[in-house]
Amino acid sequence: MKRDLSYLATCPIAVLGAGAVGKTLAADCKLAGREVRLYSRSKKSIALVERTGILMDGIQRNLYGFERSGRAYLDIVTNNMAEAVKGAKLILMSVPALAHEDYLKKLVPLLEDGMIIHTFPDNYASLLLRKFMRESGCTKDVIIGGWGSAPYGTRIEKIQGFWTNHVGIKYRAISLRGACLPMSDMDDFIESGKYLPCMDSVYTGNGPERGDTMLDIGFSNVNPVIHVPASLLGVSSMENWSLVYGNAPDSYSMYSHGLCPSICRVQYQFYQEEVSIAKAIGIDYPRYSYDMFFSRRSILTQEYMGLDENGKDNVIFPLDKPCDEGNTGPNNINHRYITEDIPVGCKIYHDLGVKFGVPTPIIDSMIVLGGAMHEKSFFSETKYNLDYIGIGHMNKEQIHNYLYKGNYNEKSN
């Protein structure tokens, strides 16, 4: 039965995480007139926010010209999660995946009936939150879901290494792929997004795409397929950017300076392995054609500039021409494009491939190369595996039953 979600129109919104996306989510919702609370476990990330507010501006490129700018003064800025989430029925989380466990375990005892949790991007957070709820005996009536990406490409302005409270939006998504756990809550989850001002460019644009389970949303996260091959295979350009070529280190862009036809071919084969895994599991996945990878924004462009009547990108940034459209980064191999997207995204793809009998040589090569650069093994030195997200012991039928209907099959002793 469809729920009455009208209470979401006036409830406080809690944003967990004060990085670039978190601050932008908070500012966007506040500038639209909502009560917004911002939580971070880091005092540094929210320093002076109460005094300065968050200045939000930028190009905000998107097909329909949606834009919202200004200086947002939030209602609560805190290092106390309980203070942020009490009575806030809309919970937005955007933190690095490796911080999910800490944030989610703190959230579980604070959950209230009627809360709806959106994670940007999900990165298996929904599976983890359901797992931590089971382990703690939490039975609160909540809707849990997430999205394949964030509603923006955004960056915090940095001045000589000092992080300001100014966020600049490079683009706004006009469509995002989302899902929830279990999928029986999907209608309500998608409906709840209408009450999030940070999703206005999506809901007034081409609208949200309904994903097919949270594993689909794992495949819908474009970060591993774009970031990892381009960062690893373009590492010499990155490391020589300032040392040899004399450029400002922070001006390097994987998109603008690292991509080339050979790397794009690797990205497409990486994607094809994702498709093979999804088909073996029996779930849907996002569709990209071969030619969509050969652009300086890769497959990301369609997220904010859309497709034409023939299903082709409205805008292509050719590889044979200079382009400054892409966000900057990475600056070194310790960047999240490598240290998050390999041990989380690539590793779960690998494990799913093993479980369902799908070879993943391209994805595996990325895990090997990234590990070699860090002088470690990302196969073993990561907590992310199928047991960690709670599905390692289940067969295909049991996984489907859990993802679609919420019926969890406990691991036998």
Image (cartoon, rainbow, N blue to C red):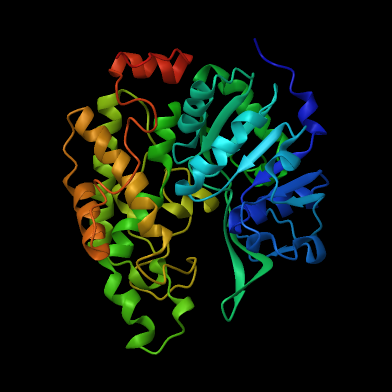
Q: In the image as oriented, which residue stretches furthest toward the top?
A: 1
Q: What residue lies at 83% left-to-right and 46% top-to-bottom?
A: 33
The reply to whether residue 331 is visible in this rendering is: yes
Is the residue 323 above or below the residue 180 in the image? below
Viewer-proximal residue, 297 or 187? Answer: 187
Please name the residue shown 26% across and 62% down the image: 263
Residue in view at x 80 percent, y 33 percent: 11
Q: Position of residue 63 (x, y in %)?
A: 59, 53
Q: Using the rendered view, name the quadrant where residue 388 is placed.
A: top left
Does residue 378 sit above or below 163 in this rendering?
above
- Residue 321 is left or right of residue 30, and the answer is left
Q: Who is closer to the viewer here, 208 or 291?
A: 208
Q: Is residue 212 visible?
A: no
Splitting the image into 4 quarters, where does residue 387 fall?
top left
Quarter of the image containing the N terminus?
Answer: top right
Q: Is residue 247 above or below residue 208?
A: below
Describe residue 144's horizontal placement relative to residue 48 as left or right: left
Q: Position of residue 344 (x, y in %)?
A: 36, 45
| Rendered location of residue 187, percent (x, y) | 60, 21
Left of 89 or right of it: where is 172?
A: left
**Quarter of the picture holding the C terminus:** top left
Q: How many marks?
A: 0
Quarter location, residue 386:
top left
Residue at (31, 23) in percent of width and height = 282
> Foreground residue, 120 or 133?
133
Q: List x then y, in percent, for residue 106.
A: 59, 38
